[in-house]
Amino acid sequence: METEAIAASTVQKAASVVGPVILLGPPGAGKGTQAIRISQRFGIPQISTGDLLRDNISRGTELGKQAQEIMERGELVPDELVCRMVASRLTQADCARGFILDGFPRTVKQAEWLDKHLAENHCFENEDGSRRLVVIRFTVEYNQLLQRLTGRRTCPTCGRIYNIHTQPPRLDGICDIDGSVLVTRKDDREDVIIARLKTYESQTLPLVSYYAQRNRLKDIDGAGDVDRVTVEAFKAIEDGNSL
């Protein structure tokens, strides 16, 4: 790892206002890994809409009850409900300096809601009236994404994830930690992955255009060395996109 570039002034970064960070990228692009590193570097929370849904449902909140009823009917949770959950989460104290949004916004409608919400609540405004908002898209070539995802193997006991192409276990098909037989998750089957990538592309391209037109989008090559990607992501956040 480029230790000096990543570790330098971490304490200072964790005390500064960062603003919202939105991570875009297809399944397998490395958003999860980079979100963890960004959270640790800048001391801001990672907010996942999936986690928000599960949390509201498990706590039996009014929003959670509404979402559960919809999901039990086999329907998608509507934007209005998801946005209300996000709005509630953003009022919590750990979001005061900034936050990382994972899986939100997924559509232009959600992006427009977020812009309006931040403006109405005067969130992260600079002295000149512009607003800090960094949108990072991790790009990875299609065939490499397939290799990353179809090569993924998971230990059913400890949860450790391997990749038979890039990060194989010492013994083929066996977890290094506890000796369990590794499994392929249903989501990692090639037919499922191809469908997920097509869905991502159709849903996200309009969102990419939305942020590019507003000069908020920063593309980072997500292929290759993970630490290099991290350094570029840190720089994008530190430079900021003030609008």
Image (spheres, rainbow, N blue to C red):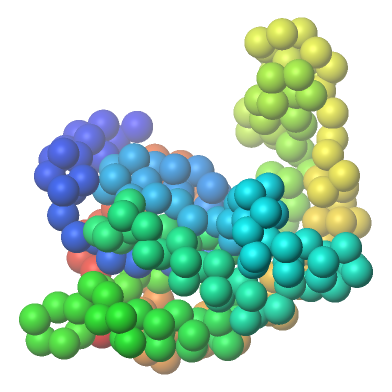
Q: Residue at x 67, y 54 (%)?
A: 60
Q: Residue at x 82, y 66 (%)?
A: 69
Q: Nearer the viewer, residue 220 or 88?
A: 88
- Judged left or right of residue 35, residue 200 is right
- Visible residue check, residue 237: no
Q: Residue at x 26, y 32 (%)?
A: 3
Quadrant housing residue 25 = bottom right
- Judged left or right of residue 125, residue 148 is right
Q: Is residue 130 above or below residue 223?
A: below
- Visible residue check, residue 102: yes
- Where does residue 184 sit, x and y in percent of width and height? 84, 35
- Judged left or right of residue 95, residue 75 is right
Residue at the far bottom: name it.
213
Residue at the far left: name it.
127
Question: In which quadrant of the rendered image does the C terminus lie?
Answer: bottom left
- Judged left or right of residue 224, residue 44 is left
- Where does residue 53 sit, x and y in percent of width and height? 65, 58
Q: Is residue 66 above or below residue 38?
A: below
Q: Is residue 168 above or below residue 163?
A: above
How many numbered badges does the structure rendering display? 0
Quadrant housing residue 68 = bottom right
- Where does residue 7 sit, x and y in percent of width and height? 22, 35
Quadrant housing residue 201 = bottom right
Q: Residue at x 58, y 88 (%)?
A: 109
- Where does residue 30 sit, x and y in percent of width and height? 55, 49
Question: In which quadrant of the rendered image does the N terminus lie?
Answer: top left
